Amino acid sequence: MTEPAFPNQPAPQPTEPRPATQPQPAEHAAPAAPAATAQQTAPPADRPVAPEPQAAPAPPAPSQELRSALAAVRTEVGKAVVGQDAAVTSLLIALLSQGHVLLEGVPGVAKTLLVRTLAAALNLDTKRVQFTPDLMPGDVTGSLVYDARTAEFSFREGPVFTNLVLADEINRTPPKTQASLLEAMEERQVSVDGTPRLLPDPFLVIATQNPVEYEGTYSLPEAQLDRFLLKLVLPLPERDQEIEVLARHAAGFDPRNLAAAGITPVADAQVLERARAEVARVQVSREVLGYAVDVCRATRFSPSLSLGVSPRGATALLRTARAWAWLSGRSFVTPDDIKALAHPTLRHRVQLRAEAELEGVTAEGVLDTVLASVPVPR
């Protein structure tokens, strides 16, 4: 199942809410109560009349200005990256949900270019860390450096102190260096020598890994995979898209010079902050919450899985569905939003049994089965 193509698909239509009680036909209606007398209806003089409960105000509609600004980001990134519109919007969902992203794709599908162009369109700082077997945790987070002039230790910030961190080929470094990102991803801070240092806001880790080369790699443990909000699989471009890529290069496009390609900032951190505040007000009914929980719980009972989705995965699904609903122009979440984000949010949180892998079962197929079997609230 491919990622949802947000820019080109219409927003899912909301389902009609079912009334709490169905109206009875006239012939089965309850008999009318007798009219109350004035003595029955008049309250005692010394007892105050309780005010009638007021209905909760409806949440405001998503701001068209903010949504247009983020749509302009997708257009701007499209000037440099061809055929990855769904991945761009998924990265925006991660920024709105304050989560992190694992990018998986074969070499040469513009993973690094995608991150650099997104940062340029949002006017955010970005740094790239090439994960290698000899990389140390201090090379990522920063470390204390002795200053001979003052005879004191001072903290030198690592590349993690930025807005968008590109952890390139994260599975090529040992687990101790992979784990150096855990505190930054969860608490958005780095502790060195017992002193916590806050990271800038917004902060997003975008890690890449190559799915076809396993020699000299260290697979991410399940606990660290669960820290990533989304796992995006970047496909190879279609024939027409690949021709467009070559045409741009033939016309002089240089991926190392984004300014020459006309990439300019069309939004900033303030726009993201205001958009996040609106996403936090998107309403979710108890029925939709139950549907999200049922989808996650169904993975725990799948005979093909040895590890199902944790409660953290359920909260992640809720966060991404709210951001998707807001981007779709709605102030409430529908079951279709849960379905649209189930694959990128849950695919890396499940683990297949060995015998299921031998039979050709995939995580995508298991999620398809789960979504088809869980009843959808109407």
Image (tube, grey):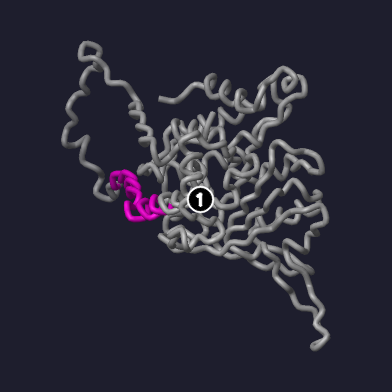
Judging depth in this view, the residue of 30 and 65 nearest the camera is: 65
Judging depth in this view, the residue of 255 and 323 nearest the camera is: 255
* Chain part drawn in magenta: 51-73
* Residue 53 lies in quadrant: top left
User: Residue at coordinates 57% horizontally, 20% vertically from top-left?
Assistant: 369
User: Residue at coordinates 73% horizontally, 23% vertically from top-left?
Assistant: 357
Q: Quadrant of the C terminus?
A: top left
Which residue was labeled with disc 1?
Answer: 249
* Residue 43 lies in quadrant: top left
Judging depth in this view, the residue of 203 and 124 nearest the camera is: 124
Dot 1 falls on a residue whose secondary structure is helix
Residue 196 percent across, percent down from the top left = 70, 67
Residue 219 percent across, percent down from the top left = 76, 41
Residue 141 percent across, percent down from the top left = 72, 63
Task: Decide: few, some or many residues near mark 1? Use Cα within 10 Å; few <14, some 14-19, many ≥20.
Answer: few
Is residue 67 part of the magenta span, yes or no? Answer: yes
Can see residue 346?
yes
Can you name the residue that lies furthest to the front here?
A: 250
For the image, the number of numbered tags is 1
